[in-house]
Image (cartoon, rainbow, N blue to C red):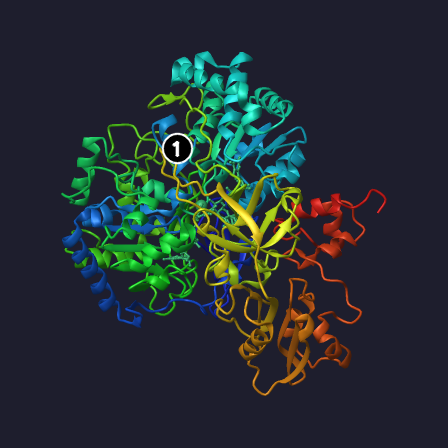
């Protein structure tokens, strides 16, 4: 399968989640492209989710960083590269190799990741290179390594479809790995006996397709899987022959599990009958896949949680066979690539180990790196603590936004502000972290860069360029190589990504004669043309011998032997108290990607959840009303959100999204609340368990403001900026100054010169409304009142994009915000076809398929299908 298809279409890979869907991009010749699913890619066979479908809308250059900057001023590449080299030379001379660092990302291509790791460990001689994968996959990596001796995902996606029971633990698959979820749902539709179980404190969209939901207490997964392990042994399901041949540690692991099992219901807060039912289902189904994600990994017991899951598969030998196995899904498009290149503080490169002298020596020789570090470096949270303490003289951040994504967010921002020398490689000018940088380097973005990524099932796919490089943006591997050579390093003379890849592939053969699961040395001799045409390729690809599709197949060899690990129960580090009575779970929304630098400016993707919302169970609301602004406070900091009430939320917990930053909603940065407590084995921080309290956000006024452009997000103590179709922006605001003064100030910001204003004010009740008209069209509006109960926004927002002059009736209705005779406002459900909840509820259909036929809702990417089902389920029987 070649990269090019016909005249202009190019195959590439989606830059978002670890499913790694293949796409076909057809550039329009004007800097844009249409994006479709690649029917030939094994991950998705043509499917895409809402984010993948909207990729074509993220290609604009408006916010792009297009030129290097030094000290906030545009610089030539030579000057910028000299500055970076000099900054690192100086810092290393002053602080030693432990006083310089790189912080990188699972959104780098494998080639970039390889170059960064060789630069840090081989040239700077520091192991201080860590990745945002520390916040994401570190617990899975540590658990795999403990259980299998190496970081290996045994199974493949097809196993999800072949399983009789699919257990999803701490995974909101419907929103976060939508195409995998769709594959699982299609398998269940074809084989209704298939069972899906969701283990998550919240009833998420993923539960819509589930047969059983276990809303366990946050952090208690180890207790559930301890109960399961004991149950499996009691039922005589331990596969003794398999254990004898392939594994060790079963006795100790079982003893630890038996010590917890009697308390499983109490510790998980689940009904004992539900725990028993779960154990029965798992036990009765030899073909079981237990898939996990961040509800497991992002925990101070993350590694134990993952090993508790793997233990159950090892005890029963349910691993490495079609339809069975533990399955850690990766988050980022190239989370796996970072693990393969070893661009983490705890790894060397290519699954080579710090603690094996021959492997260390082989790599030092290969890289001509006499100063190759001999022990692990600082992990993400330690790295930023060291930066704050003045122990890091130079830091280079690539393709990640630590100011927002790391826990203890305010302290991280302070550390970045105090960094003696900070380099940020970015694609956007609007990143919270780049704002602190001394040197900003413009990197190529998706669609422009060229290389490989590896998805959750070990399939290496090409990301291919289909757009020309804009401005002076350059590939990351090139930038790194230029700095390395300025520091006098040998090597780094690559003429393209293929050369980098070949070098990386060669490293994976260095462990020989020791056996290594991760071996792609068979690709080390690939020609440039082969690389250009590389079809999706699952590792391993050894230079000689056969490559298994699944690792640890029964009867196969395990090298080294698998290990069951005892996992004693530990509660989350922060406990709730009278002062902080709620547990805050954080995570993702369906249509947003991380810190929103790409998805946050696409109106269609912002329409589903336009504002940062904190969700509580109605029983925990304590008189607070949905739609109000609330302030969450923890021992670390505070953040402000719009309140939603939902009985899908577990009592005693709150949920808030991770996505908002200082760019769009400065008060709603959730990591201001989260402490940097980390798992003692993986050092992955506990991002899902902050103890908080909620109080009303005291505001003298609330408002929304429509403007033809985006306004700075610091115009009010609470601001959430929302892009609208047609280029205008909506700003949800609240503040504490005098309402009339705020109103005048906000009107000034709309600044519609020469506009005619309609104004309505009743200061006695704190009501101030104004709409600006230019050429008979709505050019801006400020609607301000004493509380959050403001007029609806949808109609006015649509008018901002309208073409012709307003009708008299429309003009008269502007300050009421309601279209004369129009439908009541209703939230958007289907982002692909713009279908609202009201339309779906009113269409007469009773099921998702019927609603699709009647309204097209759910017939695009399908990501909203669980939500449509939930909506329809709420219809009364006789409706
Ligand atoms: N739409 C979208 N998709 C994405 C991303 C995105 O930003 N947006 N990011 C990608 C990335 S990098 C990642 S890592 C993945 C993450 O994918 P997921 O891990 O599926 O997503 P999260 O929302 O972080 O968390 C999953 C669930 O864990 C639950 N949870 C919290 N605490 C616990 C617990 O103690 N036990 C259990 N069992 N569950 C718990 C939460 O309620 C939440 O529903 O998504 C990827 N896909
Ligand atoms: N509270 C809480 N915090 C979390 C999580 C959580 O669940 N809860 N999840 C954690 C997880 S799993 C993850 S993965 C992290 C993600 O957190 P981050 O990595 O900080 O999130 P992104 O917004 O994806 O950051 C990527 C940055 O790189 C830029 N970029 C995009 N493409 C390129 C490129 O090609 N080259 C370069 N140089 N830059 C590029 C983007 O503009 C963006 O600023 O957040 C973590 N933080
Ligand atoms: S599931 Fe969606 S976000 Fe993930 S790779 Fe596929 S299209 Fe991209
Ligand atoms: Mo992640």
The residue indicated by pointer 1 is 152
Q: In the image, 46: left or right of 844?
A: left
Is 817 drawn above or below residue 142 in the view shown?
below
* Residue at point 50%, 35% (across, down): 292
Q: In which image quadrant can residue 396 be found?
A: bottom left
Residue 628: percent from left, percent from top? 63, 57
In this picture, residue 359 sits left or right of residue 855: left
Residue 817 lies, in percent from the top left, at 71, 70
Q: Residues within 10 Å of mark 1 (few under 14, many from 20)?
A: many
Residue 752: give x, y in percent of width and height: 57, 82
Q: Position of residue 364 (x, y in %)?
A: 17, 40
| Residue 755 against residue 677 in the figure, above or below | below
For this rendering, which residue is in front, 104 or 16?
Answer: 104
Residue that appears at 59% across and 59% down: 610
Of 105 and 377, the residue lying toward us? 377
The answer to which image quadrant residue 480 occupies is bottom left
Q: Please tell me which residue is depicted at 51% across the width and 36% down the height of the picture.
A: 157
In what element is the residue under mark 1? loop
- Residue 725 appears in the rendering: no
Seen as rendered, the residue at the extreme bottom is 754
Observer-nearest of 84 and 738: 738
Out of 869 and 528, give the one closest to the viewer: 869
Ligand 4 image-quadrant field: top left
Which residue is painted at 40% across and 49% down in the image? Answer: 408
Does residue 131 appear in the picture of this structure?
A: yes
């Amino acid at each position: 399968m070649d990269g090019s298809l016909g005249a202009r279409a190019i195959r590439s890979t989606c830059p978002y989640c670890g499913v790694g869907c293949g796409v076909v991009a057809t550039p329009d010749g004007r800097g844009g492209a249409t994006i479709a699913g690649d029917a030939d890619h094994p991950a998705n066979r043509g499917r895409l989710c809402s984010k993948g479908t909207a990729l074509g809308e993220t290609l604009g250059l408006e916010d792009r960083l297009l030129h290097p900057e030094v000290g906030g001023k545009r610089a030539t590449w030579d000057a910028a590269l000299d500055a970076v080299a000099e900054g690192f030379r100086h810092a290393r001379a002053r602080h030693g190799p432990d006083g310089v660092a790189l912080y990188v990302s699972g959104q780098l291509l494998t080639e970039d990741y390889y170059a960064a790791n060789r630069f840090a460990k081989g040239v700077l001689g520091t192991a201080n290179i860590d990745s945002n994968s520390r916040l994401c996959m570190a617990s899975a990596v540590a658990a795999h390594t403990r259980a299998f001796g190496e970081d290996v995902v045994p199974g493949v996606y097809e196993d999800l479809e072949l399983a009789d029971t699919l257990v999803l633990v701490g995974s909101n698959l419907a929103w976060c790995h939508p195409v995998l979820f769709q594959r699982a749902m299609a398998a269940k539709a074809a084989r209704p006996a298939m069972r899906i179980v969701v283990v998550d404190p919240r009833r998420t969209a993923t539960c819509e397709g589930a047969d059983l939901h276990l809303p366990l207490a946050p952090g208690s997964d180890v207790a559930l899987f301890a109960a399961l392990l004991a149950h499996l042994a009691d039922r005589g399901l331990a596969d003794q022959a398999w254990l004898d041949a392939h594994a060790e540690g079963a006795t100790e692991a079982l003893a630890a599990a038996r010590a917890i099992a009697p308390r499983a219901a109490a510790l998980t807060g689940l009904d004992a009958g539900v725990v028993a039912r779960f154990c029965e289902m798992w036990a009765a189904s030899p073909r079981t896949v237990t898939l996990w994600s961040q509800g497991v990994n992002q925990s101070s017991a993350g590694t134990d949680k993952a090993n508790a899951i793997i233990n159950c598969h090892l005890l029963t030998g349910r691993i490495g066979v079609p339809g069975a196995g533990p399955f850690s899904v990766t988050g980022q498009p190239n989370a796996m690539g970072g693990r393969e290149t070893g661009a983490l503080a705890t790894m060397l490169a290519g699954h080579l180990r710090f603690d094996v002298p021959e492997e260390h020596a082989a790599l030092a020789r290969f890289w001509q790196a006499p100063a190759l570090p001999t022990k692990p470096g600082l992990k993400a949270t330690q790295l930023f603590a060291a930066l704050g303490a003045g122990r890091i003289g130079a830091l280079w951040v690539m393709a990640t936004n630590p100011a927002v994504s790391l826990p203890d967010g305010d302290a991280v921002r302070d550390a970045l502000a105090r960094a003696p020398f900070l380099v940020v490689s970015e694609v956007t000018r609007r990143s919270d972290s780049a704002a602190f940088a001394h040197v900003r380097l413009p990197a190529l973005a998706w669609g422009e860069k060229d290389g490989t990524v590896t998805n959750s099932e070990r399939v290496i796919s090409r990301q291919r360029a289909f757009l020309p490089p804009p401005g002076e943006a350059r590939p990351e591997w090139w930038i790194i190589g230029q700095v390395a050579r300025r520091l006098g390093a040998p090597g780094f003379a690559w003429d393209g990504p293929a050369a980098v890849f070949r070098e990386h592939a060669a490293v994976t053969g260095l462990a020989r004669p020791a056996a290594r699961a991760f071996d792609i040395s068979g690709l080390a001799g690939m020609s440039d043309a082969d690389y250009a045409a590389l079809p999706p390729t699952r590792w391993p690809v050894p230079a000689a011998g056969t490559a298994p599709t699944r690792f640890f197949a029964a009867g196969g060899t395990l090298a080294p032997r698998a290990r069951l690990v005892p996992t004693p129960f530990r509660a989350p580090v922060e406990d709730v108290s009278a002062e902080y009575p709620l547990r805050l779970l954080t995570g993702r929304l369906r249509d947003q990607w991380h810190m929103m630098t790409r998805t946050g400016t696409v109106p269609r993707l912002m329409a589903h959840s336009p504002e940062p919302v904190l969700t509580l169970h109605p029983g925990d609301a304590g008189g607070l009303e949905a739609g109000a602004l609330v302030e969450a406070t923890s021992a670390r900091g505070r953040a402000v959100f719009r309140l939603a009430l939902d009985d899908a939320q577990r009592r005693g917990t709150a949920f808030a999204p991770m996505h908002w930053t200082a760019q769009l909603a400065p008060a709603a940065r959730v990591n201001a609340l989260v402490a940097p407590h980390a798992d003692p084995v993986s050092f992955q921080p506990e991002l899902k368990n902050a103890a908080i309290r909620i109080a009303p956000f005291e505001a003298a006024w609330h408002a929304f403001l429509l403007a033809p452009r985006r306004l700075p997000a610091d115009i009010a103590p609470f601001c959430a900026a929302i892009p609208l179709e047609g280029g205008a922006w909506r700003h949800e605001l609240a503040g504490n100054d005098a309402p009339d003064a705020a109103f005048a100030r906000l009107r000034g910001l709309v600044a519609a010169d020469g506009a005619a204003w309609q104004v309505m004010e009743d200061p006695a009740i704190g009501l101030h409304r104004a709409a600006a008209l230019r050429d008979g069209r709505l050019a801006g509006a400020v609607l301000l009142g004493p509380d959050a109960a403001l007029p609806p926004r949808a109609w006015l927002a649509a008018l901002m994009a309208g073409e012709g002059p307003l009708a008299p009736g429309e003009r008269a209705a502007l300050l009421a915000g309601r279209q004369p005779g129009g439908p009541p406002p209703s939230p958007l459900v289907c982002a692909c076809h713009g279908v609202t909840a009201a339309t779906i509820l009113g269409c007469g259909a009773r099921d998702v398929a019927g609603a699709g036929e009647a309204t097209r809702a759910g017939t695009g990417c399908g990501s909203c299908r669980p939500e449509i089902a939930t909506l329809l389920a709420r219809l009364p029987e006789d409706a």
